[in-house]
Image (spheres, rainbow, N blue to C red):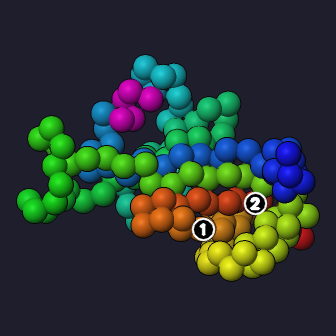
């Protein structure tokens, strides 16, 4: 096992998954009423949606998108939902810096976003046209 893989296994955990869909109501019902997740607080992002929680932590983000145009791809009479991104949480300033170093060394483009309302920093990497990985760290780890 490489030292990079070994360090990341202990310093990082899955933060959340985001599903984008034109109708989040049935998804919310399933994950709350069937899967047992809790519907909880969500910042005002300017688009509809829900944050669903596991053990007091937001684990599944549902984001509403406008209904597609008639020319878009339709699956079984409805607009297809998609998983938008995978988020990994880092709880160590040294691992965050190591990640930035590995990204720069590899020439991998990334975008930083300061989420002051959540007191977090986010880093996004587009791996392919529809595959994004988000890394998240609480701001207090960076001070």
Asked which secondary structure carries label 1, the reply is strand
Residue lying farthest to the top in this orientation: 34
Residue 49 showing in the rendered view:
no
Residue shown at 48%/59% (left/top)?
A: 131
- Between 80 and 31, the one nearer to me in the picture: 80
- Whole-percent x, y for residue 130 in the image: 42, 61
Name which quarter of the figure residue 66 lies in. Answer: bottom left
Quadrant that contains the C terminus: bottom right
Disc 2 or disc 1, which is closer to the eye? 1
**Magenta stretch, main secondary structure class:** helix
- Whole-percent x, y for residue 85 in the image: 51, 55
Q: Check if residue 29 falls in the magenta segment.
A: yes
**How many neighbours does mark 1 have within 10 angstroms: few (below 14), some (14-19), or many (20 or more)?**
some
Question: What is the magenta range?
Answer: 27-31
Residue shown at 86%/61% (left/top)?
A: 95
- Between 71 and 3, the one nearer to me in the picture: 3
Quadrant that contains the N terminus: top right
- 143 with respect to 57 (left or right): right
- 10 with respect to 76 (left or right): right
- Between 123 and 62, the one nearer to me in the picture: 123
Residue shown at 68%/60% (left/top)?
A: 135
- Whole-percent x, y for residue 128 in the image: 48, 65
Q: Is residue 107 above or below residue 74?
A: below
**How many neighbours does mark 2 have within 10 angstroms: few (below 14), some (14-19), or many (20 or more)?**
many
Name which quarter of the figure residue 30 lies in. Answer: top left
Q: CA distance from mark 2 to mark 1?
A: 12 Å
Residue 35 showing in the rendered view:
yes
In this rendering, the count of numbered labels is 2
Q: Which residue is mark 1?
A: 124
Query: Residue 137, labelled with which disc?
Result: 2
Q: Check if residue 39 falls in the magenta segment.
A: no
Q: Is residue 52 above or below residue 127?
A: above
């Amino acid at each position: 096992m490489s030292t990079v893989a070994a360090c990341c296994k202990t310093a990082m955990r899955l933060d959340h998954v985001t599903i984008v869909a034109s109708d989040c109501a049935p998804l919310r019902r399933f994950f709350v009423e069937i899967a047992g997740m809790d519907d909880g607080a969500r910042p005002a992002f300017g688009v509809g949606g829900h944050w669903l929680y596991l053990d007091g932590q937001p684990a599944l983000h549902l984001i509403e998108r406008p209904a597609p145009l008639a020319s878009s791809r339709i699956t079984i009479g409805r607009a297809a939902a998609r998983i938008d991104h995978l988020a990994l949480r880092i709880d160590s300033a040294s691992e965050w810096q190591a990640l930035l170093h590995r990204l720069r060394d590899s020439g991998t483009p990334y975008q930083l976003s300061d989420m002051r309302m959540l007191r977090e920093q986010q880093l996004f990497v587009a791996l392919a046209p529809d595959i994004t990985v988000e890394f998240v760290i609480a701001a207090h780890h960076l001070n």
